[in-house]
Structure formats: structure tokens, C-alpha cells
Image (cartoon, grey):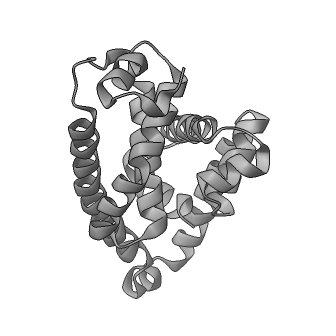
């Protein structure tokens, strides 16, 4: 079956039945358009690439719930618009949190305590990563510690980019759950964000 000759509507119908090649064709058709659209607002290539990958991860994970009559173009751009807005809000909030944590006045006030807390949370974060299955751990480390893109990881490990996305998504879910079980998640969140994006 030649998927590049199919209409968006037909590809959407096939996708709703779990057809991976239809998903791949939609990815090829829309990834650059969504990337350029997002980049205009986010002004950051790495952040934009992550957003686009997350959008397609969401599309694949929700494939069986997609109405075959969806206008897939409008659907993808609506999701993208919402992700851009949420990302800008979250980025602003995270930056404020990190600025507060790292501010000179706070560090001077509780310098000794911060060193202990910093060490404890780093250890918890490392422990959570070490509990991931070997392949998932490797992919997560390449992404978040070595700052490789999903495409680079896929090429390095000879796996599909969608497999990379799923492993990272599951890793983040597990790490958040692990931290919530071992500490106060509300207090942990700023540090989790800080460590995650180092």
C-alpha cells in the first residue's frame, strides 16, 4: 500500500485502526510544518523539537480514540497551539521557581540546609533512574543527561523514534511517581524540574 498517495482523511481512518505506516506518513507530512509553527513562538529549537515529538507521541497513544472524520490538520495544529501555550506558561513558572531556589538571598539564608536537600534529592532522582529497565534507562540518560535529540537516540540505538518517545514518556511517569512516594511531591517538584533539565 502506497501511503504517500493517501489523503489525510484516509490516513486518519487507517491510524484509528492502529496502522503504524499511516502514522509515519502523517508524521512525515506534518512534523516540519508543526516545527516551524512552534518555533515562531518558542524561539528554541530543542524545546520546539520536544514539543513536536510529544504531539506525535500523543497522536500515536490516542490513535484508537481518534474519530476517522477528524480534520487531522486542524486537530494537530490545535494540539500544537495548546502545547505552545502550556509550555510558555510552564517555562515561565519553572524559571521563576528555579530563580527563587538559586537566588543569592535564599542560598545565603539556608546554605547548609540547601546542600543537604540538594544532595538528598539528587540521590533520589538517581535512584529513580537506576530503577528503570536497562534500555529505558539508557534512552532516558541519553535524552536528559547527554542532551541528545530523539532522532539522534533512535539512530544511535537503531530503534524507531516512536520507541524512543514511548520510553522517555514512561520514564518520566515512573520517576515522578517514585519521587512522590519517597517525599512530599509539592516540595519535590521544583527540584525535580531543576535536576531534570540540567
Is 187 situated above or below 9? below
Q: Residue furthest top?
A: 17
Who is closer to the viewer here, 110 or 67?
A: 67
Residue depicted at 34% across the width and 29% down the height:
7
On screen, residue 137 versus residue 35, left or right, reads right
Q: Could one spot residue 106 in this view of the protein?
A: yes
70 in relation to 16, above or below: below
Where is 83 relative to 46, above or below? Answer: above
Snapshot quadrant of residue 47: bottom left
Q: Provide residue 109's location: percent of width, then percent of height.
A: 42, 81
Q: Nearer the viewer, residue 107 or 195?
A: 195
Is residue 184 visible to the viewer in this orientation of the structure?
no
Q: Quadrant of residue 5?
A: top left
Q: Position of residue 13 (x, y in %)?
A: 35, 17
Q: Quadrant of the N terminus?
A: top right
The relative height of residue 195 versus residue 131 in the rendered view (above or below) is below
Q: Residue at x 24, y 60 (%)?
A: 89
Q: Position of residue 88 (x, y in %)?
A: 27, 62
* Residue placed most toward the observer, 179 or 23: 23
Quadrant of the frame with the C terminus: bottom right
The mark tally for this picture is: 0
Amino acid at each position: 500500500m502506497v501511503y504517500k498517495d493517501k489523503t489525510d482523511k484516509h490516513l486518519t481512518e487507517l491510524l484509528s485502526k492502529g496502522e503504524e505506516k499511516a502514522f509515519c506518513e502523517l508524521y512525515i507530512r506534518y512534523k516540519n510544518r508543526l516545527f516551524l509553527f512552534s518555533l515562531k513562538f518558542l524561539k528554541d529549537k530543542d524545546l520546539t523539537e520536544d514539543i513536536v515529538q510529544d504531539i506525535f507521541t500523543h497522536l500515536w497513544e490516542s490513535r484508537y480514540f481518534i474519530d476517522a472524520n477528524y480534520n487531522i490538520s486542524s486537530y494537530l495544529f490545535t494540539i500544537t497551539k495548546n502545547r505552545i501555550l502550556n509550555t510558555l506558561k510552564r517555562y515561565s513558572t519553572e524559571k521563576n521557581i528555579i530563580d527563587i531556589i538559586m537566588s543569592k538571598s535564599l542560598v545565603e539564608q539556608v546554605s547548609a540546609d540547601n546542600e543537604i536537600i540538594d544532595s538528598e534529592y539528587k540521590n533520589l532522582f538517581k535512584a529513580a533512574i537506576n530503577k528503570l529497565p536497562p534500555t529505558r534507562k539508557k534512552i532516558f540518560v541519553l535524552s536528559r543527561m547527554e542532551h541528545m535529540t530523539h532522532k539522534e537516540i533512535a539512530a544511535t540505538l537503531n530503534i524507531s523514534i516512536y520507541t524512543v518517545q514511548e520510553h522517555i514518556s514512561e520514564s518520566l511517569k515512573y520517576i515522578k511517581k517514585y519521587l512522590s512516594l519517597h517525599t512530599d511531591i509539592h516540595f519535590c517538584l521544583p527540584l525535580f524540574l531543576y535536576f531534570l533539565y540540567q
